[in-house]
Image (cartoon, helix red, strand yellow):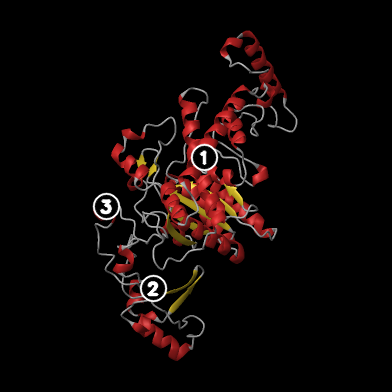
Amino acid sequence: MAIWFARSRNLVSSLRHNLCLSSTILVKRDYSPRPVFTTSQLSSTVFLSPYVASLRHESTAAEKQLDVVQHSDDQEDALQELDFPGGNVGYTSEMKFIPESSSRRIPCYRVLDEDGRIIPDSDYFPVSEKLAVRMYEQMATLQVMDHIFYEAQRQGRISFYLTSLGEEAINIASAAALSPEDVVLPQYREPGVLLWRGFTLEEFANQCFGNKDDYGKGRQMPIHYGSNRHNYFTISSPIATQLPQAAGVGYSLKMEKKNACAVTFIGDGGTSEGDFHAGLNFAAVLEAPVMFICRNNGWAISTHTSEQFRSDGIVVKGQAYGIRSIRVDGNDALAVYSAVRSAREMAVTEQRPVLIEAMTYRVGHHSTSDDSTKYRAADEIQHWKMSRNPVNRFKKWVEDNGWWSEEDESELRSNTRKQLLQAIQAAEKCDKQPLKELFNDVYDVKPKNLEEQELGLKELVERQPQDYPSGFHV
């Protein structure tokens, strides 16, 4: 092969002259240069990472090489393509490797600055007063809900909880940009999407307490919400399983010619799972209307992103699978709303998947089973909680427009807190699911071995009732 490439020009000339094959094997094509971001364009928008310079780009040999097809020194080679089963591809007689990563990071789209002011010449969808106020109200409600349920777990009233603190804008702004017909396959940090769609505080409380009014019949851990009525798939604990499922849901919507798309969420740690790659590849190949939204919040429990991947975050992974992608400031509600709204339009009208990487920070502990101060500095958490809070940033913008006041703020938070406490008290007093629900809905016809297990468990409960919580019914 090396000899063949070394003599490529002579072979091409000979083929053209003697066999006239230039129209069947070698095709002329016009290559236009790719757009390049200038340093000034990048400096104001790029999210910098402390480990980029020290880890990601130590080797610069490959980066200095030019694009093998579009910028070849040999113009004759640059205009040729070879026809392979995998597709037409240009060739070069020089051995060149593609760089492991670009020296310039993909810029991050944002609309609001840190003080809640619109950045001049921003490209975004205008938001009405009614929509903006509702978005802020829901973000504030989500904050209050997280604080109260977290305290309920600490009091031993529920077994587990997980907050969305620091990621409220991704929750609410993405939900506001979607259609109710869009099918959502969440991870576990998207209760705000369900809240936006009308899931009540009482319904959240019933699920966390696993009582008889819980739609999951008490079989799921707290915060594993689900609602058929709201097109919101029930959350499952295993990481990233929802991504290949979303590709299938999106393809189903396409086959049924529905004016809707599938929307699925994942954290940065979930991109290390095989299901992430399978999901993206399936959606790309099937040309399914699926929106993949990755919350890059810096931490997969205690694992920092520098230990998760060497690529420029998540956004570049979409291009590898042939998926249109964008990086957005996840703490900017207007930017998230605009990006998701545009992505949805592409997914539905063009029947294609889209990937969104939302840059943010997980302010809370991973869950009530975690103490994040063991692996990150407390002042770092405080900085993001106070100085870069997405709720506060959006509130400043709404206030500056004259749409919100301190009186509105006090009334909203007071009423929300009161409603939540009432919902928790009612859910706590409500009876638990009967024991038989543990065995129902597993098989169409209950097999004998399952009947024996059910009978054995009932006998155990009757012998040792003190080992089971009050309100537990056989």
Q: Earlier in the sequence, mark 1 or mark 3?
A: 3
Q: Is residue 280 above or below residue 225?
A: below
Residue kind at label 1, given as amino acid type = Glu
Residue kind at label 3, given as amino acid type = Leu
Q: Quadrant of residue 302?
A: top left
Please state the horizontal and vertical placement of residue 238, each as a whole percent of the image.
51, 38
Of tags 1 and 3, the one toward the viewer is 1
Camera-nearest residue between 337 and 292? 337
Instruction: Report which residue position mark 2 lands on.
Output: 35
Can you say which quadrant of the picture contains the N terminus? bottom left
Q: Earlier in the sequence, mark 1 or mark 2?
A: 2
Please state the horizontal and vertical placement of residue 339, each as a whole percent of the image.
49, 60
Left or right of 246? Residue 303 is left
Instruction: Report which residue position mark 1 lands on.
Output: 411
Q: Is residue 55 visible?
A: yes
Left or right of 37? Residue 414 is right
Instruction: Report which residue position mark 3 lands on.
Output: 55
Q: Residue at the right extreme?
A: 445
